[in-house]
Every structure is written in structure tokens, then in C-alpha cells.
Amino acid sequence: MITGGSASRRFAWLAVLIAGYATLAHYTNSNPRAKSLGAVMAIAAPLAVALGVAWRSAYRLPALLAAALVAVLLASQWRIIEGNFPLMYLFEECAVYALLSFTSARTLFDGRVPLCTYWANLVHGPLPAAVARYT
């Protein structure tokens, strides 16, 4: 069971990791001599997410084998990745925005609570009918 202290420490570490990643990403994009670090940073986040998904998958072994294949592919194409790592940062941003758009759009179908209404209910409690219609 997670207590309040450990949850807040976990969120603090997550905030530090995100801020550190953003800082290093900015540094690698603004410093031409940091190509290797930039390439590592650009592939680290997507690989970490992919490994996390693979680990939680019911098909763990095939997913981990696919991750190993991707790692071999990345290693074989390292010079190209190193020379074009800013495009990988762009791909990451586009993927995150697409995921957020998809998540928001699926809540707009019939029988679902729109995401903005859900968040407004969380923040303000039950909404008056006119506000709920608006959201």
C-alpha cells in the first residue's frame, strides 16, 4: 500500500526526471558537440516506455524479443540516428500530442463523459446542468 509520503516522493522523483530530461534535451539540441548524448536521450524515453509496455504484456517473451530486435536495429543505424536525433525529439512530441488528441476525442462519443466534463467534476464537484451541458 502506498502511503502519502511515498507517493509524494514518487511524484517528486518523477518531476525531477522529467525536468532533467527536458533540460538535457534542450542542451543536446543547442550544443552541436552533444550529438551522442542527444541520440541516447532521444531514444531513451521511447525505449523505456516500450520496455515497460512489453514487461506488462501478456505476450512478454515476444514483446521482449521485438524490443531486442529494435535495439539491434538502432545499434546498426547509430550514425544516422546520431546525425538526425532532433527529428526523434519531434517524433516523440508528435506521438504524445496524437495520444492526447485520441484520448480526448474518444470521450466525445455517445454514452461517454467528455474529458473536460470529467476534469471539471473532479475539480469543482457535481456541476450545475447548464455548466455540464457547456462542458
Image (tube, rainbow, N blue to C red):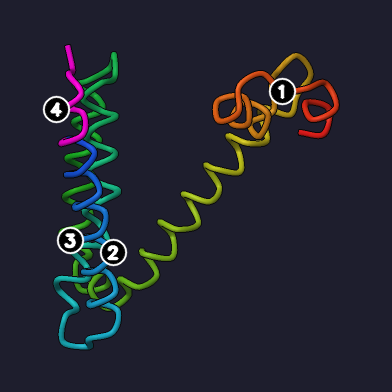
For the residues marked 3 and 4, what is the alpha-carbon distance in whole angstroms? Answer: 41 Å
**Label 3 Cα crowd, 10 Å radius (few <14 / some 14-19 / many 20+):** few
Q: Which mark is residue 127?
A: 1
The dot on residue 6 is 4
Residue 40's x, y, as percent? 17, 63
Q: What residue range appears in magenta?
A: 1-9
Which image quarter is the N terminus in?
top left
The picture places residue 88, in percent across and down from the top left corner, at: 36, 64
Is disc 4 surrounded by few (<14), some (14 to 19) or many (20+) residues within 10 Å? Answer: few
Residue at x 19%, y 78% (from the top left corner)? 35
Q: Is residue 5 magenta?
A: yes
Q: Give the residue drawn at x 82%, y 21%.
A: 129
| Labels 3 and 4: the sequence-earlier one | 4
Q: Where residue 122 sits in the image (x, y, percent)?
A: 55, 25
Mark 2: which secondary structure?
A: helix
Between label 3 and label 4, give the one nearer the viewer: 4
Query: In terms of depth relative to the viewer, which is nearer, 83 or 17?
Result: 17
Near mark 1 (Cα within 10 A), the count class, few <14, some 14-19 or many ≥20, is some
What residue would you read off at disc 3? 76
Assign a secondary structure to mark 4. Answer: helix
